[in-house]
Image: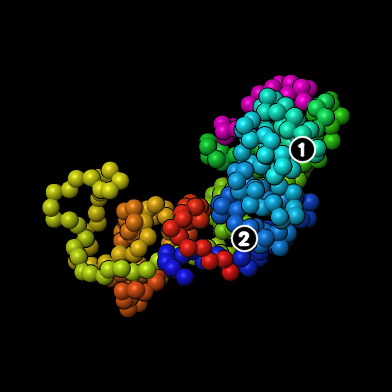
Amino acid sequence: MGYPKVVVDTKIITENVKCIIEKTKYRNISIAGVTKGYCAYPEIAKAFVDGGVDYLADSRLQNLKKLKDIAVPKMMLRLPMISEAEELVKYADISLNSEVKTIKALDKAAQKNGKIHEIILLMDLGDLREGFFKEVDLFHAVEEIKDLSFIKIKGLGVNLTCYGGVIPKTNILKRLTALAERIREDYNIELEMISGGNSSSIYLLDDGLPEGINNLRLGEAIILGTESAYGKTIPGTNPNAFTLRAEIIEIKEKPSVPTEEIGRDAFGQIPTFVDRGVRRRMLLAVGKQDIDIDTLTPTDEDLIILGGSSDHLIIDSTDSKMDYKIGDIVSFNMHYVSMLRVMTSPYIEKEII
Ligand SMILES: *Cc1c(COP(=O)(O)O)cnc(C)c1O
């Protein structure tokens, strides 16, 4: 197998899912396992299902297509495009929505497909990305769509901590459960699913997730064990399911700071340097088009990531106890952004174990 390579340990992912479900099941919260962070590789999605997720969810139709042979209901996370309605109802059982025109297009498509499509109506509770901002607009939408024959209003949902960085709080999510109560009473609709957000809502499980929230859509929390409101590791999870492995192509002693006049680097930025004197530096054959340098951590804690360019990663290995040689492999753990980029890059070999 070639390098650079990402090794994905599906057993760790299954255990992470089990760990989170242990914390949510006593409250009857269903979990939609979000697959977009790893491009919905079916082998990894199966690890979600083995761990016990109730739904698989993704923001892209191409990804949901890849999951068609896995027998759990699928959820579309991004607001559907009208242009994809016909395909969407084939590959997604549920979608998140905030536009009546789109929902009517989904109704038509579902009729053609001969199957009811379920929708979650999204409220924007302050993060300012998607969802109805005014409550009255939500009620008007319910009135307009409640009698569509091929659409079932399955519930309400919210997404936070994505654009605005707004952290879910008890009072914010209580607005959602109160709205659900009101729709149930006024329109006699069951609203079986109240979806209370993503990995940033996990921290509320310990205190403050309102009664009535009965679904979470989780990617980061079950893949990397991180709750994303405060960036903490969730007790009992393992953050190291994904490991990047890259090969050393040069080792030389060099000064830390260029001695000639400095212009811009390969990405148009004026670089800055820490002067540590002459240091032993290694070049690795992986670069910014494959990884996010800021969210990568070498497993050898004595390595310092100095920077990189499109195809190179530059590492200071002076303080390491390891005797690295040309051709050796260096390993890294990854946060969400690096994982996403690594899984998206066609230059990175994928080894799923
Ligand atoms: C990506 C996404 C999620 C999952 O986010 P994580 O932070 O990885 O848990 C949930 N809901 C929506 C609408 C999303 O776009």
Q: Can you tell which quarter of the image residue 279 is in?
A: bottom left
Number of on-image labels? 2
Q: From the Cβ of disc 1, is ligand 1 less than 8 Å away? A: no
Badge 2 crowding class, 10 Å Cα cut-off, few under 14, some 14 to 19, many 20 or more, is many
Q: Position of residue 105 (x, y in %)?
A: 70, 28
> In this orientation, which residue lies closer to the viewer: 115 or 39?
115
Identify the residue shown where x is 71% and y is 47%.
74
The secondary element bearing badge 1 is classed as helix
Residue 85 is marked as none
Residue extending farthest to the right is 188
The secondary element bearing badge 2 is classed as helix
Write down the region rendered in magenta. 121-145
Report the side of 13 relative to 330 (left or right): right
- Is 132 drawn above or below residue 317 in the view shown? above
Q: Which residue lies under the disc numbered 1?
A: 113
Q: Position of residue 93 (x, y in %)?
A: 74, 43
Q: Position of residue 320 (x, y in %)?
A: 33, 73
Q: Which residue lies under the disc numbered 2?
A: 44
| Residue 138 is inside the magenta segment | yes
Quarter of the render that holds ligand 1: top right
The amino acid type of the residue labelled 1 equals: Asn
| Residue 325 is inside the magenta segment | no
